[in-house]
Image: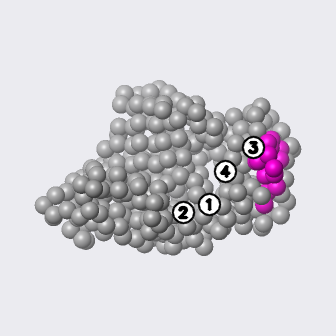
Amino acid sequence: SHAFAYKSIKIKYRTKDEQDNDVIASGVLVYPEITQAFSVPLVLDNHGTIFLNAEAPSSAITTSGSGIQALAASMVGFLGFAVAFPDYLGYGDSSDKNHPYILKKSSAKVSIDMLRAAKRYMTDHNIKNNGDIYISGYSEGGYVAMATAKEIEANYSGEFTVKALAAMAGPYDLAGLANKEINATTNMKYPAFLAYLASSYSIAYDDIDLQDITVEQNTTKFNSLFDGNKNATQIHIALGLTNGDGYRSYRLNALFQNSFIDDYKNNINNSFKRHLEQNSVYDWKPNMKVNLIHCIDDEIIPISLAQTAYDKFIANGDTNATITFT
């Protein structure tokens, strides 16, 4: 029923982690089977937060009925685009590595290098790219898409011409998100996301120690929750954040120490706060077309983060950005 038959290929490529070590990463390239007379646009699509390695694109593409199969069918089968899906570090062929969750530098690097590897594969196999590159992503992928586009415009504009960016429901303003979580009068909506962030930043930065910020003092156990073998429910159970009435009944201090929460609120030099500010990706002026897409009822990533990014783009002189609330 598709306009185009399509093929998928797993790609392994070299990239660098947050500490600039060489790493072998992986992803999937899906492309339409067309005659060599045609050339196709290339989309770099970045997936949302996952906890299981089985959900990484290079694994999920072979799973019948998976979301990535549906996405490939729509973008490749119907529209005739080629689509590159990076696994990210910590998944696929780098599953033995730490995933740099919501860390700007390595998130952008792994996606840019996936884009480079996909273009090389297409050239080597006579799949013509018409020169148009689009970047998209949802949730964590929205953040990665924004970080990637920002980095391309800053340092890779001679190599890639990005026509448009569609960033969906991403935490672009990390300090803004943290302030909402810290000052919320409601319960945590999805503690595993915040725990993953704490684990990621404690691994990346020497001045963040899980023993100082989380209720769970066994840092080895805490970090092991994010090894690609445990789903969100298992993570919540291990953290003691679920029972008969579900994990939504827990306040922030069920995960983080009150002393850390107080320091975050009152100390402008709080190390976690500073690193969140360093990794935010909303303060720039895109030259490409950008559409920020966000669900009005999103309980995890508030729509205010998209509005903040849009307002900053406009303040920086961008006249092409649009924002779409659904």
Q: Earlier in the sequence, mark 2 or mark 3?
A: 2
Amino acid found under the numbered disc labelled 4: Phe
Q: Are marks 1 and 3 in contact (CB under 8 Å)?
A: no
Residue 209, given in percent of the width and then of the height, sits at 78, 57
Q: Main secondary structure of the magenta part?
A: loop
* Residue sitting at x 66%, y 47%: 275
- Highlighted range, magenta: 238-255
Is residue 168 depicted above or below 121 in this figure?
A: above
Of badges 1 and 3, nearer the viewer stands 3
**Is residue 78 toward the left or the right of residue 322 in the image?**
left
Residue 106, given in percent of the width and then of the height, sits at 53, 58
Q: Which residue is mark 2?
A: 55
Secondary element under disc 1, as helix, strand or loop, is: loop
Amino acid found under the numbered disc labelled 2: Glu
* Residue sitting at x 51%, y 73%: 93
Secondary element under disc 2, as helix, strand or loop, is: helix
Q: Residues within 10 Å of mark 2 (few under 14, many from 20)?
A: many
Indicate which disc residue 193 carries. Answer: 4
Secondary element under disc 3, as helix, strand or loop, is: helix
Residue 106 in magenta stretch:
no
Residue 20, given in percent of the width and then of the height, sits at 54, 65
Amino acid found under the numbered disc labelled 3: Arg
Q: CA distance from mark 2 to mark 1?
A: 8 Å
Q: Which residue is mark 1?
A: 51
Q: Which residue is mark 3?
A: 248
Q: Earlier in the sequence, mark 4 or mark 2?
A: 2
Q: CA distance from mark 4 to mark 3?
A: 13 Å
Q: CA distance from mark 4 to mark 1?
A: 10 Å
Q: Are marks 2 and 1 in contact (CB under 8 Å)?
A: yes
